[in-house]
Image: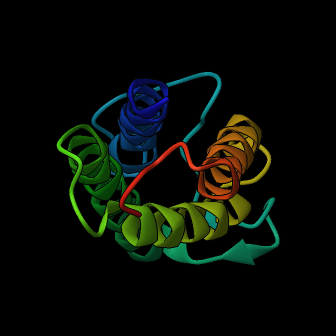
Amino acid sequence: MRMILATLLLGHGVAHVVGFAVPWKLVTSTEVPYRTTVAGGLIDIGPTGVRLVGILWLLVALAFVSVSVGVLQHGTSWYREAFAIVMVSLVLCTLGWPESRPGVVANLLILLLLIAGSVLGWYPGV
C-alpha cells in the first residue's frame, strides 16, 4: 500500500508543477491558460500575485515529492506531513478552480488512502 500511496503523492507533486510553469510563462497550455485571476475568476491578483501563487504551487510540488520519498523510506513524520500538504494543495486547487478539478479529486483520493490506512493499520509505525 505504501508503494501506491508514494506513487500517487509523486504523481500529484509532478502535476503541481503546471501551477508554477503557466504563471511564470514557462509553458503554454490550452487546458490551463495563463490568467491573473484565482478562485474561478472571482479575484484578480495581477501578474505579480499570480507568480507568487505559482511559487506556492512549486513549493507544494516539492513537498509532495519529499513526502513520497518519506513514505518509501518508512520515515517517522511522513503521515502528518502528507496530511498537511494535501490540505494546502486543496486550498491551491480551490484558487486554481476550475482547471484544478482533477487535483481536488487526487487530493480526496490521497486523503482517503491516508485515513483508511491509518484505521486499517496499513502504515505500521505511523
> Which is nearer the eye, 72 or 49?
72
Looking at the image, residue 64 sits to the left or right of residue 32; the answer is left
In-image side of 112 versus 54 (left or right)? right
Whole-percent x, y for residue 67 in the image: 30, 53
- Residue 103 position in % (x across, y down): 65, 42
The residue that appears at 36% across and 34% down in the rendered structure is 10
Can you tell which quarter of the image residue 81 is in?
bottom left
Residue 4 x/y as whole percent: 48, 25
Q: Is 126 above or below relative to 111?
A: below
Query: What residue appears at the point 43 percent right and 39 percent down from the top-left corner?
Result: 9
- The residue depicted at 64 percent of the width and 70 percent of the height is 91
Q: How many marks?
A: 0
- Quarter residue 28 falls in: top left
Q: Residue at 27% of width from left, 44% of height from top?
A: 65
- Location of the C terminus by quadrant is bottom left
Q: Where is residue 88 shown, x and y percent of the image? A: 53, 71
Front-lying residue, 107 or 41: 107
Is residue 47 positioned above or below 15 on the image? below
